[in-house]
Amino acid sequence: MPALETIHDARPVLGHVNLMMDSFIANADIDDMRAVVRTFLATSPPSVTAAFHDAARRRLDKMNAKQLSPSTQLFSKSVDGFSHPTPELATVLRRARSLYGAGMGFASLALLTQVVRATLGMRWQEDGDTADILAHIDADITQAIQSSKEESAGGRVTDLSGARATVSELQNALVHTDRDAEMRGCESPFERALVSMQYWKF
């Protein structure tokens, strides 16, 4: 009778979280959890930080975090014709920041492109909440571009043509918003992002 074949699982062996520590993770206040994670990463060897980044990217990729539901409403128009950010926009921006913070810059750019497109034809008050959030989005795009550069330099871009398509789509969206603002005599909402895109050779 032939010997039974031994099957080796190529997946890494995962340890179990201590029951008490799991209880802490499940019940800790979000600010306490942030403080613990920051302290842990700051006092650990670089390999631990790298492993944390890998785990974060796997989680975000599994959650398909770059996809935006077609029903998502990022801005709402008030009776005076001006647009204002919705709570859904805040959720989308948190997701985009999680992506570029974890080193998934191109996925973040894909999400932010949808945000930029949502501003086309929009009117807002120069000293209102919308102007403030647009300035934050402008900064987010530049951060996501830097994250994308690091992602590319680190050899973590598996779909090069897809990444280039993402960059092209964002650049087109930024150019359209710039022209839209110019036609309406307004200041371009994403000026820094557009400059960053124009100087990015990818």
Image (cartoon, grey):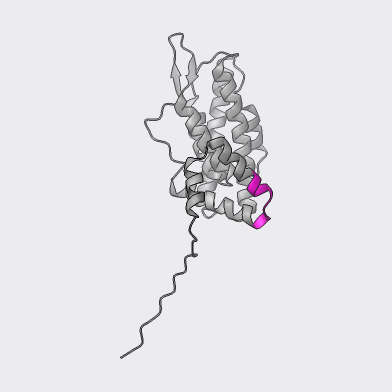
Q: Quadrant of residue 100?
A: top right
Q: Residue furthest top?
A: 80
Q: Nearer the viewer, residue 166 or 28?
A: 28
Q: Residue furthest bottom?
A: 1
Is residue 173 something that shows in the picture?
yes
Q: Nearer the viewer, residue 168 or 92?
A: 92
Q: Residue furthest front?
A: 20
Q: Position of residue 49 (x, y in %)?
A: 63, 52
The residue located at (64%, 27%) in the rendering is 191
Quadrant occupied by the N terminus: bottom left
Q: Nearer the viewer, residue 159 or 12?
A: 12
Q: Quadrant of residue 140?
A: top right
Q: Position of residue 130 (x, y in %)?
A: 54, 19
154 over 139 or under it: above or below: below
Magenta stretch, overall SS: helix
Q: How many marks?
A: 0
Is residue 168 something that shows in the picture?
no
The residue located at (48%, 40%) in the rendering is 27
Q: Find the magenta span and give its range.
A: 39-47
Task: Residue 115: say if magenta.
Answer: no
The residue located at (59%, 21%) in the rendering is 132
54 over 27 or under it: above or below: below
The residue located at (69%, 50%) in the rendering is 43
Q: Position of residue 35 (x, y in %)?
A: 61, 40
Left or right relative to 125: residue 146: right
Q: Position of residue 122 (x, y in %)?
A: 49, 19
